Each structure stands twice: as structure tokens, then as C-alpha cells.
């Protein structure tokens, strides 16, 4: 296969593995990094170089996670997402494993070049192992309040430090957004009940029932997320808009419109976090 065709093929494979998760990683991470420019005194050329380094780190970070998750989650994907590369037959399991080795090697290699990224890099690797290789990562508490919170901290932490100096205020906002994401990520489990049940996960809908989990999300998790944003000094920046988005999100969660509707609700939740 010619070099150009090979590169195009690998880019297509990357998109096939990761396209569903851009809205939860690359897009909000990039928005947060752009927001950090206001607190940066770096010259424009350095800012561009630092931003590109961050995008490279985040892209490898996402690819490593997607490969890890989909290599260990083939049975679930056959039910919930049969169009993914492995269950659809686009690539073999062995091909995915080879790409996993390449992705994790490239991901780790950035840390010696930029040592400030090392804590978040190690945290992401450890959290990925926790989510994909342990039973605790299949439980609603471990999956969201540990896994998603830690990955949110890693992603947003690098988003900021790649562009601007770390300050107590920036740290508080990174922690607040990461914990807020943990409270709202339960929404994605509403659409995946069939596949989660087949592989033995204990997500919120499977433990508390569909309507019970929707009540918990709307009247406990979402208000808690707003409170966390308030503690981080974020909610006060635009209380009417954020409050309205919270109300819309809660309304959609309670509607029980089916998996496709719940997926759109999840996307609304990601938009809410990106706006923050």
C-alpha cells in the first residue's frame, strides 16, 4: 500500500474509533485551552506551538482510551455500537492491539518532551486501566465519580497548563468542571442499558431502574453539579444561562424519549459543560 494511502487509512481508522468522543474530549478541551489565552502572556507563535502540542497530546490520549475501551468491550459494542471498527469487521482484534501499542507509546513519549504533562499522562493511563480492566470501573460510582472525574481533571489540567500559568483560580475551575462532569455523565448510561446489562455493568439505570435513575439525575446529580460549579466560581459568571441549560437538561432526562433521544440529551449535557 502506498505511503499516502496507508496514512489516509490510519486516519480513517482513528476517526472510526474516536468520532463519537470528540464532543466529550477534543472539542471541550480545545475550548478550555482557547479560554486560557486570556490568562497567558506568551507570544502568538509560542501560543500556536503550545496549542498544537496540546492537541497532539489530547488526540493520542483519546485514541489510547478508545482502543483500550473497545478492545475490552467488544461484546457490549456488538449490541450498543455495532458500527465500531472491531465488531463491524473493519479491523481485526489483533490489528487494534497493534495500534494500541503504537498509541500508548506515542502518548507516553510526549511526557519527556513536556514534563509538566506527566501527572495528567500517568493519571489518564491509570484511570483507563481502572475503567477497562477492573470490576469497579463497571459500577456507576467508579465509572463516573472516579473514572470520569479523573479523566476530566487530566484533560482540563493539560488544556490550561499548555497555554497559561497554573493559578489557584484555574485549579479551582478545573476541579469544579471535572467533578461537574462526573455528576452529569450518568446521562450517557440511559441510552446504553441493553449493552451494559449484557456485559454485567452496574450503571445507575440498571441499579435504580430507568425512572429511578432519571429522578436521581434530575433532582440530585444536576443540582449538585450546579453547586460544584458555584463553589468553583463558574456558575456566578452566567447564572441565568447555566440555570436555564440545567432546567432544559433535567426536562429532557425526565421525558423518557428512547435511546436516540437520550443520546441527544447527552449531547446537550456536553454542550452545557463546554459552555462552562
Image (cartoon, helix red, strand yellow):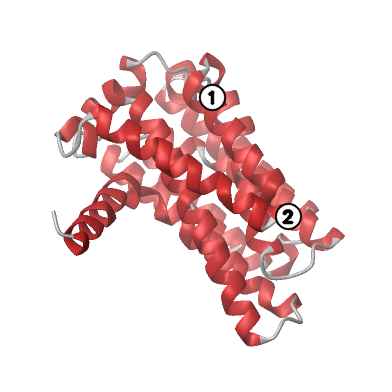
1 lies left or right of 275: left
Which secondary structure lies at badge 1?
A: helix
Badge 2: few (under 14), some or many (20 or more) residues near its Cα, within 10 Å? few
Residue most extreme to the right? 168
Q: Which residue does the image show at 41% across and 42% down from the upper left?
A: 102
**Residue 127 visible in this rendered orientation of the protein:** yes
The residue to which callout 2 is attached is 116
Mark 2 or mark 1, which has the lower sequence index? Answer: 2
Q: Which residue does the image show at 52% across and 27% down from the upper left?
A: 131
Q: Please name whichever residue, 105 or 33, is drawn nearer the observer in this view of the structure.
A: 105
Q: Please name whichever residue, 86 or 5, is drawn nearer the observer in this view of the structure.
A: 5
Q: Please name whichever residue, 271 or 164, is drawn nearer the observer in this view of the structure.
A: 164
The residue to which callout 1 is attached is 140
Could you tell me how far apart the alpha carbons at marks 2 and 1 are, in whole angstroms? 31 Å
Residue most extreme to the front? 2
Q: Which residue does the image show at 15% across and 59% down from the upper left?
A: 2
Label total for image: 2
Q: Position of residue 174 (x, y in %)?
A: 71, 54
Residue most extreme to the bottom? 44
Q: Position of residue 196 (x, y in %)?
A: 36, 22
Amino acid at each position: 500500500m502506498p505511503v499516502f494511502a496507508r496514512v489516509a487509512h490510519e486516519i480513517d481508522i482513528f476517526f472510526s474509533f474516536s468520532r463519537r468522543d470528540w464532543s466529550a474530549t477534543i472539542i471541550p478541551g480545545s475550548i478550555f485551552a482557547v479560554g486560557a489565552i486570556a490568562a497567558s502572556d506568551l507570544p502568538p507563535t509560542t501560543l500556536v506551538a503550545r496549542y498544537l502540542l496540546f492537541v497532539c497530546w489530547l488526540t493520542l490520549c483519546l485514541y489510547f482510551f478508545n482502543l483500550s475501551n473497545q478492545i475490552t468491550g467488544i461484546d457490549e459494542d456488538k449490541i450498543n455500537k455495532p458500527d465500531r471498527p472491531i465488531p463491524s469487521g473493519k479491523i481485526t482484534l489483533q490489528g487494534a492491539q497493534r495500534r494500541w501499542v503504537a498509541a500508548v507509546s506515542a502518548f507516553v513519549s510526549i511526557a519527556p518532551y513536556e514534563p509538566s504533562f506527566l501527572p495528567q499522562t500517568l493519571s489518564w493511563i491509570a484511570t483507563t486501566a481502572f475503567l477497562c480492566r477492573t470490576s469497579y470501573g463497571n459500577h456507576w460510582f467508579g465509572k463516573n465519580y472516579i473514572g470520569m472525574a479523573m479523566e476530566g481533571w487530566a484533560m482540563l489540567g493539560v488544556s490550561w497548563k499548555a497555554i497559561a500559568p497554573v493559578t489557584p483560580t484555574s485549579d479551582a475551575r478545573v476541579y469544579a468542571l471535572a467533578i461537574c462532569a462526573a455528576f452529569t455523565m450518568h446521562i450517557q448510561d440511559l441510552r446504553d442499558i441493553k449493552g451494559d446489562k449484557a456485559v454485567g455493568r452496574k450503571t445507575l439505570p440498571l441499579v435504580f431502574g430507568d425512572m429511578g435513575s432519571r429522578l436521581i439525575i434530575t433532582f440530585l446529580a444536576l443540582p449538585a453539579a450546579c453547586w460544584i460549579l458555584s463553589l468553583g466560581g463558574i456558575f456566578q459568571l452566567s447564572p441565568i444561562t447555566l440555570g436555564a441549560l440545567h432546567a432544559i437538561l433535567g426536562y429532557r432526562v425526565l421525558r423518557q424519549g428512547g435511546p436516540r433521544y437520550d443520546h441527544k440529551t447527552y449531547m446537550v449535557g456536553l454542550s452545557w459543560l463546554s459552555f462552562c
